[in-house]
Structure formats: C-alpha cells, structure tokens
Image: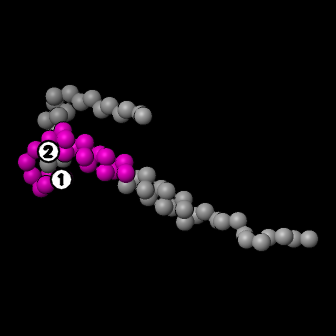
Amino acid sequence: MAVVTITTTAPQDARLGPAFGKLLNGGGTASAAEVKTWLIAQLRSVVQAYEQQEAVNAIPPPAGFDPT
C-alpha cells in the first residue's frame, strides 16, 4: 500500500488550520484529523469520478458479430 506524507512547517500549520477551519466548518481552526478526512474524501471523489467516466466511455463489444 502506498503511503503519502505531507510535511508542513509550524508557519504553514498556522495558515492551514484557519483556512481549513473556514472551509470545513465556517470558522475556527481545523485539526490535522479534519484536514486528513477532507483530503481522503477528495482522493475518493477524484477516483470515483474518473472510474464512472471511464465506464460511460467504454464501448462493449457487439454481441453476435459474425461477418462473412
């Protein structure tokens, strides 16, 4: 299983917390767990949208195609 690590500095954390707090709950400071949950949801959304679009674009082979 792949591991994705995102490393931030204390000054970056000071910016991330309030920004995600506003995005996720309208104010305050988001925790690392809340940011992680949001990132996982974004990953899931991108993969599912991609797979759904690929399924729509798939052309099944014709049934009973026997030219002579």
Is residue 31 magenta-colored?
yes
Residue at point 41% right, 33% down? 2
Residue furthest to the left in view is 28
Name the kind of residue labelled 1 in the image. Answer: Leu
* Residue 12 vertical position relative to residue 26 in the rendered view, above or below: above
- Asked if labels 1 and 2 touch by Cβ distance under 8 angstroms, the answer is yes
Give the quarter of the figure containing the N terminus. Answer: top left
User: What residue is disc 2 on?
Assistant: 30
> Residue 57: image x %, image y %?
58, 64
Q: Is residue 63 left or right of residue 22?
A: right
Relative to residue 68, is residue 2 depicted above or below?
above
**Marks 2 and 1, how far apart at CA:** 7 Å
Q: Which element carries disc 1, helix, strand or loop?
A: helix
User: Please, which residue is most extreme toward the right here?
Assistant: 68
Query: Residue 58, percent across and down?
Result: 61, 62
Give the SS element for disc 2.
Answer: loop
Query: Where, by quadrant of the figure, is residue 3 drawn?
Result: top left
Alpha-carbon neighbours of circle 2 within 10 Å: few (<14), some, or many (≥20)?
A: some
Residue 29 on the magenta span: yes
Q: Which quadrant of the figure contains the C terminus?
A: bottom right
Q: Is 46 left, or right, of 51 in this rendering?
A: left
At x 9% / y 52%, what residue is drawn? 27
The kind of residue tagged 2 is Ala
Q: Residue at 16% of width from left, 28% of height from top? A: 10
Residue 19 visible (yes or no): no
- Given residues 12 and 59, the one toward you in this image is 59
Q: Main secondary structure of the magenta part?
A: helix
Q: Where does the magenta region start and end?
A: 22-44
Where 44 falls versus 5 (above or below)? below
Residue identified by numbered label 1 = 24
Residue 41 seen in render:
yes
First in residue order: circle 2 vs circle 1: 1
